[in-house]
Image (cartoon, helix red, strand yellow):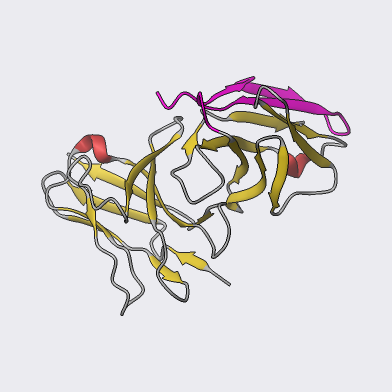
Amino acid sequence: AQRVTQPEKLLSVFKGAPVELKCNYSYSGSPELFWYVQYSRQRLQLLLRHISRESIKGFTADLNKGETSFHLKKPFAQEEDSAMYYCALPPRGAQKLVFGQGTRLTINP
Amino acid sequence: DSGVTQTPKHLITATGQRVTLRCSPRSGDLSVYWYQQSLDQGLQFLIQYYNGEERAKGNILERFSAQQFPDLHSELNLSSLELGDSALYFCASSASGRTDTQYFGPGTRLTVL
C-alpha cells in the first residue's frame, strides 16, 4: 500500500536557521508528491508540488527516488513559517490524497 | 483564497443527532473530496465525487453519506453521531478526476457533546 511517513511530529528551530522537514514514501514507480501547509486555524494550502519544481516562500523539495524521500527545505527560517506541514501523495490509479501525520514546525525568535 | 467554501464553520450537536455539512467547489472544478482531520487519526480521506458521481470511497463510516448536486456543490451527511466523530471536516476540489492539485476549504469544526 502507498504510504507517507513524516517521522517528526514536532520540529523547533531558531529564526534564520535552516529547516528540513522529512517525508518518506512507499510507492512503486514515479509518485506525484505534494507539500501542504496549515497555518493556525486556517485551511490547508498547497505549498509546492513535485512536478512543478517551483520554490514557494523560499521552500524547495527534491524527489529522491533512491531514498524514497521528498524532504522540504528552507535555508533561512522565518517566524511566519511556524505551521503544520503535511506531505501527501495520490495512490496509484486514484485521485484522493494520502497524507502523512504532519510535522508541527515552530520557529523561535 | 482558494475559492472553496464550506458551511457552517462550527457545529455543536449532541450524540445521536444528524448533521449536514456543505461544500461549494472552486468555479469550474468538477471533483470534490471530503477529508476528516482528527488528533488521533490525522487527515483521512472519506469520499470523492466527480461531476455528480461517486468516484472513490475511503474510510467513511456507514453512518456517513455524501452527494454532489447538479450545480456541483456537495453535502456530507453524518448521522447517529458519536463523541468520536468530533473533528474538522475538510472539503477539497480539483479541476478534473485526474491527479490535479486539490484546493481545500476552510473546514467545518464538528463538536459532538
Looking at the picture, how far across and down is residue B73, in whole percent? 65, 25
Please tell me which residue is depicted at 58% across the width and 57% down the height of the picture. A94
> In the rendered structure, does residue A67 fall within the stretch colored magenta?
no
Looking at the image, residue B99 lies above or below residue A30: above
Looking at the image, residue B109 lies above or below residue B37: above
Looking at the image, residue A91 lies above or below residue B97: below
Instruction: Choose top left, top right, bottom left or bottom right for residue B83.
Output: top right
Quadrant, the C terminus of chain A = top left
Q: Is residue B88 left or right of residue A50?
A: right
Quadrant, the N terminus of chain A = bottom right
Q: In the image shown, does A94 or B4 lie closer to the viewer? A: A94
Q: Residue furthest bottom?
A: A66
Instruction: Please provide the residue range marked out in magenta.
Output: B1-29
Q: Is residue A3 left or right of residue B70?
A: left
Looking at the picture, how far across and down is residue B86, in whole percent? 69, 38
Looking at the picture, how far across and down is residue A17, in whole percent? 13, 51
Please tell me which residue is depicted at 32% across the width and 75% down the height of the picture. A65
> In the rendered structure, does residue B4 fall within the stretch colored magenta?
yes
Please tell me which residue is depicted at 20% across the width and 46% down the height of the picture. A55
Instruction: Choose top left, top right, bottom left or bottom right for residue B68.
Output: top right
Instruction: Choose top left, top right, bottom left or bottom right for residue B81.
Output: top right
Q: In the image shown, does A7 or B19 lie closer to the viewer? A: B19
Looking at the picture, how far across and down is residue A51, in whole percent? 32, 55
Please tell me which residue is depicted at 24% across the width and 43% down the height of the picture. A107
